[in-house]
Image (cartoon, helix red, strand yellow):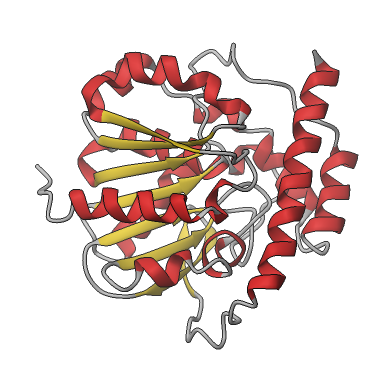
Amino acid sequence: MKEMIIFQFRLIYMLITLLVMLSSVAKCQSIQNEGLKYHYFDSERVQIAYLEKGQGEPVILLHAAMADSKFNWVQFGIMDSLAKNYRVIAMDLRGHGKSGKPHYPNAYGRLMVGDVIALLDHLKIFGAHLLDYSMGSHIAMAVMADYPDRIISASFGGPTWIKTGGGNIEPLPSREFFSKMNDEVFGGSNDMDAIMFCLGSQADWAVTKKALEKAHVSCLFIFGTKDETGKYIPDLKRELGTCASFTDIKGAGHGDALIYPAFLQTVLQYLSDHYGSMLH
């Protein structure tokens, strides 16, 4: 079982490496040339960084583990495309990017959900759309469950569902594995103590079936056809019912789905369909 999990993470590692290669080919403009700058606020004694661009209904972007807002959303043009019609806010999750990186285990978990609400409060935004990827989807699902009245819609890329009790949580690879990924994919930019504390808190992102049933938030789930996390689709369909829709990205895996044109096209169409939705 552990060997299979290691293989899955190695596959994700290769796909993330492909993302880096494709980003250099795309020659996207740097964050400075895009006219973006980081803003900061404090959430539970941790400084949280975020980028903001555009006008319109707010869309909050939550990135994957070991990435940051620049890696997931800026370099592939996703933030820029969304900002043509929306007020787009991409936050660096605590432990990542320009945000604070506390070195103790109880500084992560459900506090990361609170960071999203603190961002909305800081910007005086009552409700927003969510767009998230991988680990960001864990956080977003918990936000949706805990604060459904603050969410207009939620788009989940490559999500899994961490159930209460943690029975479906797979053990993490070693610190050495993640350190190698950090060096070879992210240029050694991550604080590995913070990363391991963050990933070690995943059981605290659990969401109950009852909370999902009661949320009644319109959701879009996007899975690559080669993404192993697609095994969660039947459970999500059963618990979310008519609130959820599902889209496959043909040929995509877990690490590379967001660079496929179909990913952005699907998100843009979904947001357009839910533009102007009123919160109650």
The quadrant in which residue 7 appears is top right
Give me the residue at 49% from left, 25% from top: 161
The quadrant in which residue 275 appears is bottom left
Q: Is residue 107 left or right of residue 151?
A: right
Closer to the camera in the image, 6 or 108: 6
The quadrant in which residue 14 appears is top right
Give me the residue at 86% from left, 48% from top: 179
**Rendering coords of residue 244 (x, y %):** 29, 29
Closer to the camera in the image, 56 or 269: 269
Q: Is residue 171 left or right of residue 108?
A: right
For this orientation, the residue located farthest to the front is 250
Q: Which image quarter holds the C terminus?
A: top left
Q: Is residue 270 visible?
A: yes
- Rendered position, 24 above or below 262: below
Give me the residue at 37% from left, 39% from top: 143
**Rendering coords of residue 115 (x, y %):** 44, 51
Closer to the camera in the image, 145 or 3: 3
Q: In this view, does 7 lie to the left or right of 146?
A: right
**Rendering coords of residue 50 (x, y %):** 47, 67
Total numbered labels = 0
Closer to the camera in the image, 27 or 37: 27
- Rendered position, 244 above or below 258: above
Q: Which image quarter holds the N terminus?
A: top right
Q: Is residue 117 visible?
A: no
Q: Is residue 149 left or right of residue 51?
A: left
**Rendering coords of residue 245 (x, y %):** 31, 31
